[in-house]
Amino acid sequence: MHPITAQRGAMTERPPPVRCVAMAMAALAAALRAWLAAAAPRDAAWREALARCAPPLCSLAALAAQMRAAKRLPWGSSALGAFPDLAERLWRKQRGAAEALLEQLGSRRAELRTVRDAVGAAGAAVVRLYEERAAELGLEVVLRRGPRCPSLADALEGLQDVERYYRRLYLEIKLFLFRISCDSLADMETLPQSWERILERYKGHVVQDTLLKISLFVDNQRELCSSAGS
Amino acid sequence: MAAKSPGDGTPRRPVLPASARKIKDNAADWHNLMMKWERLNDNGFTTANKIVNIKISEQFQDNKMEIACDNPGSEKPAPKYSEELDNCCEELLETLKHMTKIQLKMEKLTSTTKAICDLEAFHHRAGNCTAPIFHTWPTPYFYEVSLKLSEMYKKELQLKQTIVQEIAHSADQDLMMVYLSSWLYQPYIENSSKLLLEAMLLETRHRRC
């Protein structure tokens, strides 16, 4: 997403007619309302995909503990020495189980990517609309806040915050999942703790705060237009 | 050998010869036995997991007592009887008994299929044709598949017998974890077993393409 831009020289020119401002503001409010309607279910889908990552990660950690135990075991001196090919067969089955769990995590990653892309596209569409109508609005209107209403700039900044949140967290999760390997069982055993650390870093309420901010804007943006003419 | 259609023209399934009927029933039995085995395997894993947790917990308690006594040279306390452990061992033995019955039934299915092949071979010598009974599988292939599956489960049962005998007597945590893992992942039941079963069900028309 590009930084928010406004037409230069708007402050020195005559302010646009009130009717133009109201129409532009209404268009942007409609776009933000549509963004809002889609954002809440997308965030719910994101949270669900994150929650569904935890069980396969715990299973992988348990599996890693089993695989490490099998590597440490002196097979010949136990009762299992009567099964000479058991170690290799068990390893193959455990690898198969690990791959099945990694496939599940791959599906979760795809769900997260879908949300990231949808949020990015929706936010970009709103910002594009703003850039087309910026001249009609004027910088003063864009930056104006009301008693109960954040400014349009605040709302658009919120869109960028949300997009950045999903983009960065997705990238961390993608790298985290790509690094999981049966060749490093010690790391595999600590997957749940590593996962919690990632979620902890992104614990903030960026999305909820932005939804609230945009919802306040959409509900109260008319008061910004009525004070524009005064 | 097709039955006559009723007056409304509804197509009927062809009536199979007796040996084909038997092979079809055997395929269904294989499916049911393998499903029952999987359920028993899950139950057995839950019980074996409990046994291992009790053993680890007992070891932890023993270590704590040893530290509390602060007398490393003194005798270790005698292991206490655990009713819970005893019950779990009984449960696991019971599960193993059921699995043994299933494996014996699998051997029976294999020997029945062998008998059908021998009968067909006898008729072939008498000059009768040996076209596939269903789609493409020659009759001896049903025996080959049954034997393969039966051998997998026989070997797996031997492993499970060893695990049941040893798991409650082991003190090594790595060994206990390997017992659990071996029980759960069934190393002697190859991944191809599911494919063989599905192929058999498809061939005998239990499944539609």
Image (spheres, helix red, strand yellow):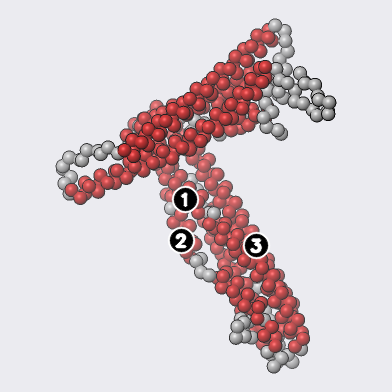
Secondary structure of residue under mark 2: helix
Looking at marks 3 and 2 on the same chain, the residue that comes earlier in the sequence is marked by 3
Residue A117, numbered label: 3
In the rendered view, would you say B123 is above or below B12? above
Q: CA distance from mark 2 to mark 1?
A: 14 Å
Residue A58, numbered label: 1
Give residue A80's quadrant in the image: top left
Q: Which residue is mark 2?
A: A197
Looking at marks 1 and 3 on the same chain, the residue that comes earlier in the sequence is marked by 1
Read off the chain for label 1. Answer: A
Query: How far from the left and from the top, in percent, is residue B160?
Result: 43, 30
Q: CA distance from mark 1 to mark 3?
A: 28 Å
Secondary structure of residue under mark 1: helix
Residue drawn where x is 63% and y is 31% of the image: B198
What amino acid is found at the position of numbered circle 1 in the picture?
Cys
Residue drawn where x is 72% and y is 10% of the image: B128
In the rendered view, would you say A56 is above or below A153? above
Residue B204 visible in the snapshot: yes
Residue drawn where x is 30% and y is 39% of the image: B82
Query: How far from the left and from the top, in percent, is residue B119?
Result: 64, 11
